[in-house]
Image: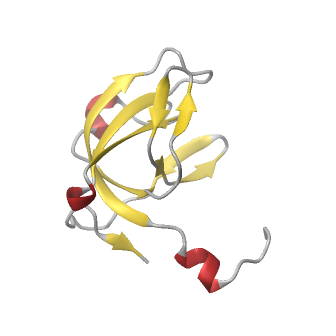
Amino acid sequence: MEKIITFEDFRKVDLRIGTIIEVSDFPNARRPAYKLTIDFGELGIKKSSAQITTLYKKNDLLNRQVVAVVNFPKKQIANFMSECLVVGAVKDKDVFLLHPESKVQNGTVVS
């Protein structure tokens, strides 16, 4: 187990549901990745980089809902500015995207 945090620490993380509306290759990334454009409803459109090319094809990602942290500061990745962090489970270096069981409104809070 990693470091224990308080419930108040967890409440600082803003996890939201968003829908991937655009996927493109990211050849400048150090490891194979996609550039994702994600619609978070009232929060707007945010971009992210995700190292998910081994399990997901670009067409499979379009219109897929994902869970993302939306309150991290922007991060420069090569020549790209990432605005959120898509959440996934990691097994043997592969990332399995987390998503709602049923379609929900973009921007829905995950708690």
Q: Is residue 68 above or below residue 105?
A: above
Nearest to the observer: residue 4 or residue 53: 4
| Quadrant housing the N terminus | bottom right
Please, which residue is most extreme toward the bottom here?
Answer: 7
In the rendered view, tell whether residue 101 sits above or below residue 95: below
Residue 34 x %, y % = 43, 29
Please indicate, yes or no, whether residue 40 appears anywhere in the rendered image.
yes
Give the image's coloring scheme: secondary structure
Residue 7 falls in which quadrant of the image? bottom right
Task: Locate residue 3: give its quadrant.
Answer: bottom right
Q: Residue at x 61, y 83 (%)?
A: 8
Residue 22: % across, % down: 26, 33
Q: Residue 75 location, x and y as percent? A: 55, 38
Q: How many marks?
A: 0
Tell me what residue is drawn at x 26 percent, y 31 percent: 59
**Where does the image place residue 42, in percent across and percent down from the top left?**
21, 60
Q: Nearer the viewer, residue 110 or 72?
A: 72
> With 71 as the anchor, is 30 left or right in this view?
right
Q: Quarter of the image containing the C terminus?
A: bottom left
Residue 53 shows up from this direction? no
Residue shown at 54% from the left, 23% from the top: 32
The quadrant holding residue 67 is bottom left
Q: Is residue 29 left or right of residue 17?
A: right
- Could you tell whether 64 is left or right of 10 in the image? left
Question: Seen from this angle, which residue lies furthest top?
Answer: 27
Q: Name the residue rendered at 34%, 24% in the picture.
A: 24
Q: Is residue 64 above or below residue 6?
A: above
